[in-house]
Image (tube, rainbow, N blue to C red):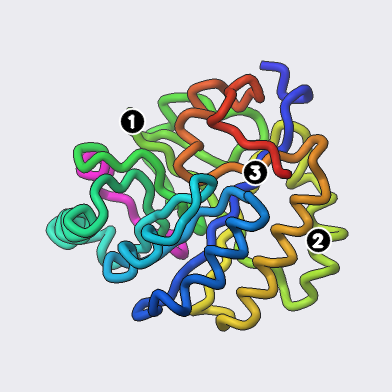
Amino acid sequence: MRSSAAPATVVICCGVPAGTSPAAVAPWTNLAARSRMPITWVCGRDVLPTVLAGVADEQDVALDLDAAHVACRPALRREIAAARERVGDIASIVVSGTPCLDHRSLLVEQGIQTVAVGGFEHATRSSRRPPPAGWQCRSIVWGLWEVRTVPRPPRRAMAWMLAGFAGPRLAPGSLTVVHIDPVVIGERQARGELERLIAWVGRRPVGVRAARLGDLPGLLHAGGQPETGSVLRRAA
């Protein structure tokens, strides 16, 4: 694979707190729609229908789960089933921290293809499929990719944009999955960081591409190469 010829891929995941009303969701989804930036909205099952109703074609949704739900097989099955009752198919989930993914086979059975986590726990088996160079991901069981996220920028967000994203994390052919969590940092700061990140990616159309979390299985199947047509969207 010629990773040096491939663009750096950026996935922006932004959380939506539980209980958020349609009126409160609209400014966030409209911001992404105006920029035509691929965004993955991370939300619990109760907010999924509200968010999904307002997303544009460039956006998708992922189910937000905590480590306790992922660790308990019945709870995991119940949460995915409840989400599907509300919005249909769910192919991606996001779990903060370093969860123990003991029920990977269940995730595959339930149609989950991508799990975004804050860190990888120790695995007794190696990845069945080698990821592209520079991609923090692995596939312990067939049909499921685990990808590692980086947290939202530090409070000096502009310094992060200018220094952090100019460094090795955006080397040619690399993958960076950013998770902005309003519950952790507050909605006001999360909104500001989302705006800055969208603007930053939009100013760098050469060598940087934005994708949704749900796009990653297709990209990984293609080895991270840019010849993936509509699956990988160039930042406008």
State which mark lies toward you, 2 or 1.
Answer: 2
Which residue is disc 2 drawn over? Answer: 161
In the image, 21: left or right of 2? Answer: left
Identify which residue is drawn at 62% across, 64% down: 31
Dot 2 or dot 3, earlier in sequence? 2
Which residue is disc 3 drawn over? Answer: 210
Which residue is disc 1 drawn over? Answer: 143
Task: Give above or below for 213 relative to 226.
Answer: below
Badge 1 crowding class, 10 Å Cα cut-off, few under 14, some 14 to 19, many 20 or more, is: some
Percent across and percent down for residue 232 are 59, 33
Percent across and percent down for residue 114 are 40, 43
CA distance separating discs 1 and 3: 23 Å
Dot 1 or dot 3, earlier in sequence? 1
Identify which residue is drawn at 55% across, 53% down: 39
Give the magenta part as a residue range. Answer: 96-107
Quadrant where the C terminus lies?
Answer: top right
